[in-house]
Amino acid sequence: MKKVLVMGGSRFIGKHIVTMLKDHYEVIVLNRGNVPLNDPLVHELVCDRNHVAKLKDLLAPYRFEYVIDISGYTASQSEGLVQSLDLSQLKTFVYISTSATYDM
């Protein structure tokens, strides 16, 4: 089954995205753990994305085909995520922006 990483995923639009995906993909959600998912169909990784070294260690075993980032607020957060991913199998990276956008 194809893997999708959802950054955020426990509130607002992320919760709905995860619900739509979980029957068709292996969904891994990375969030800070403030709102537990409690969903047996979704694997939850807990990490503050601002701690890039921990993020890299946590994501190292995974190869994602799809990444949906709905929790990036700064360019450095987006850069840290990209640096933490193995891009060899990545097909699509979707960044759902806040009120700001960043030139990568």
Image: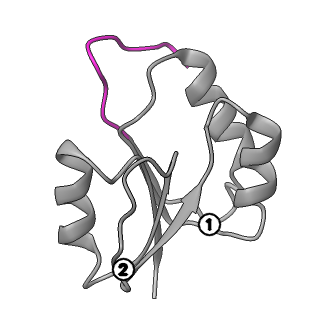
Between 100 and 40, the one nearer to me in the picture = 40
Residue at image position (59%, 26%) is 77
Element at label 2? loop
Q: Which contiguous range is marked in magenta?
A: 95-104
Q: Which residue is denoted by mark 2 in the rendering? A: 25
The amino acid at mark 1 is: Gln
Work out how far the residue at label 1 is from the one at label 2, CA to CA, in angstroms.
Answer: 15 Å
Residue 24: x percent and y percent? 28, 83
Going from N to C along the chain, the mark reached first, 1 or 2, is: 2
Q: Is residue 33 above or below residue 5?
A: above
Q: Nearer the viewer, mark 1 or mark 2?
A: 2
Q: Main secondary structure of the magenta part?
A: loop
Left or right: 93 with respect to 9? right
Q: Which residue is denoted by mark 1 in the rendering? A: 89
Dot 2 alpha-carbon crowd within 10 angstroms: few under 14, some 14 to 19, many 20 or more: some
Tell me the quarter of the image containing the N terminus. bottom left
Residue 26 — which label?
Answer: none
Residue 8: x percent and y percent? 40, 46
Element at label 1? loop
Q: Is residue 103 above or below residue 82?
A: above
Between 98 and 46, the one nearer to me in the picture = 46
Tell me the quarter of the image containing the C terminus. top right
Between 65 and 50, the one nearer to me in the picture = 50
